[in-house]
Amino acid sequence: MKILLRRNLNSALRTIPRPCSRKPVSTRKLSTRGPILARSNTARKLALAVLFGSAIGGSVLFSTKHKSVALDTQAKGVSVEELQKHINEDTGIWVAINGNVYDLTSFLSIHPGGPQIIKKYAGKNASKIFNKFHGPDFISKYLSPEDCLGPLLGELGEAEDITEADDDETRKVFRDNLPPLSEIFTLTDFEYVAKKICSPTAWYYYSSGAEDEVTLRENHNAFSRIFFKPRVLVDVASVDLSTKMLGTWTSVPFYVSAAAQAKLGHPDGELSISRGCGTEDAIQMISHYSSYSAESIIKEAKKNQSHWYQLYVTGKDAARQTVESVAKLGVKALFVTVDTPELGRREKDMKLRARLEASMASESEKESPNSTAPPNEDEINDNKKASDEPKAKGADQGQEDLKSNVVYGRDLQVTWKDIVEIKSWTGLPLVIKGVQSVEDIVLAAENGIEAVVLSNHGGRQLDYARAPIEVLADAMPVLRERGLNDKIEIYIDGGVRRGGDVIKCLALGAKGVGLGRVFLYANACYGEAGVRKAIELLREEIRLDMRLLGVSKIEDLGPQHLDLRNLYSRTPPRDNLYYGNYEPLSPPRFAHEE
């Protein structure tokens, strides 16, 4: 999380189009916001949290854009010497970003990953790490002018990016020698290249799953247990892949699913994904935690290009404001994510963050000459007071802080009643994303929900959750039996790597298929060109497989084209952690073998 924070700081603030307007204040604690912030306190906290805390999570919420205020001629700015005095909570935590100075004291108590990483950059120029993660409009949309203390006066070099790894030079060599796109033949080729060139932060965020990653692997493996039943002597001279999803016609039956913080892999982040989708006529779902704002992403779109928006409910007021904002931007559908009441244990990501925290703690000790001095009585009392504060039942905040580089919004109170209320806020089609059981699909249909996405969050939440393709195979017969199959559209994501996987989903009854990681990898490697190539590969695989299957139109696909007899014949997943430590019994030895 800390890694992400630093990167986030530097990227978003570098390209601020306007100066900040607040006079320097020598000491300032938490400030109250004026009417210029037309959003709930919850929304503001989450936005600030994302500023420092998101790694694959950036422009979280839509909020009223701060009006540009001319620089007060009385405000002379903040000198380097003054900035360097504000390095703790008593004096205020001040940070320089892209030529301006910001008071981030109020953010310390908000950051779910702890205050250490912010304090690490107190009194320093954090532009390098901030710009690594955020788009140019982040500051103007998510910080109040009161957070800006004025321009930085004097020269101050950018502080070191502590998230950079020792093998950065090795990865740079790979990036400078990328295989040409002409040598990319499968979607997994993008993943192979991305693993070589992405930073550890990006790679582990993009690729990791929950706990033993059984569900992560099963999402993909389940497709290998479904076989085709091709028909012959069918006119397949022309194969039409166009289809209608949520009332919008598109040239392909798949879409780019929401995935946070694309900027981790490529400077253009979601912008280049949007451009690629526009050129290839594929729908892009914008993540609630995208690196760039929805407004910036949609500005990259071509005329008549379609976007959907993924919403995390972080409070009713903030959610409603977000819904109204994206509706004005012209998104075609709203997807409410419901499978993250708490984050799953993404342990690869957690280990990386733990190593970073340990490194930061070690550096802090070296920088503090009095760090080995025994604590005084006041410090002991303060520590005891903090340790006596009640914690949430069952909570382990240290572990919670490590779970993800993205500050996901969590609202444990969202129920079916709330979904119906959210639906009343907008005329957009409302889709529930993260459904994992037949029972919940039926409830959605009975509650008038237009669509659901069968998804287990890419295997990143509950390990041993079933593969979505299995849930789909169970659900469609029930919906048909109850006469609900025409009342709700079913979408699916997770584990898709081939055009044949898409066809299997469509034949079982899915209306469309989402892919997230694949496009993060393609974008990280080749930007817009990679996104276009990934779409082209999928399109060609689907076209060819449909022709060989004996089907010329999407609507003609059905269960009759599939052999499902092995779908539920799971083999026990290999527990790599267990067998890595297991020492098998040895057979008896012959005397001459001693």
Image (cartoon, rainbow, N blue to C red):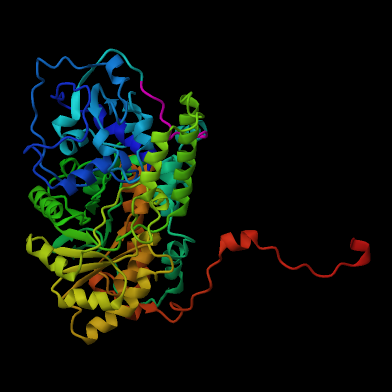
Front one among 242 and 68: 68
On screen, residue 165 versus residue 43, left or right, reads: right
Position of residue 162 relative to residue 512, above or below, is above
* Quadrant into which the N terminus falls: top left
Q: Quadrant of residue 473?
A: bottom left
Q: Is residue 246 visible?
A: no
Q: State the residue lying farthest toward the bottom.
A: 481
Q: Is residue 305 left or right of residue 581?
A: left
**Place of residue 34 in the rendered image (x, y in percent of width and height, measured from the top left):** 8, 36
Residue 79 appears in the picture as rendered: yes
Queried whether the magenta region covers residue 162, the answer comes back as yes
Q: Position of residue 554 (x, y in %)?
A: 25, 69
* Residue 387 among magenta residues: no
**561 or 412: nearer the viewer:** 412
Which residue is situated farthest in the right direction here?
A: 592
> Residue 576, how many percent across, how many down?
57, 61
At x 46%, y 26%, the residue is 368
Q: Which residues are magenta?
A: 158-167
**Count of numbered labels shown in the rendering:** 0
Up the image or down, 85 lies above or below 548; here it is above
Q: Nearer the viewer, residue 346 or 180?
A: 346
Taking the spot 40% from the left edge, 44% from the top edge, the residue there is 384
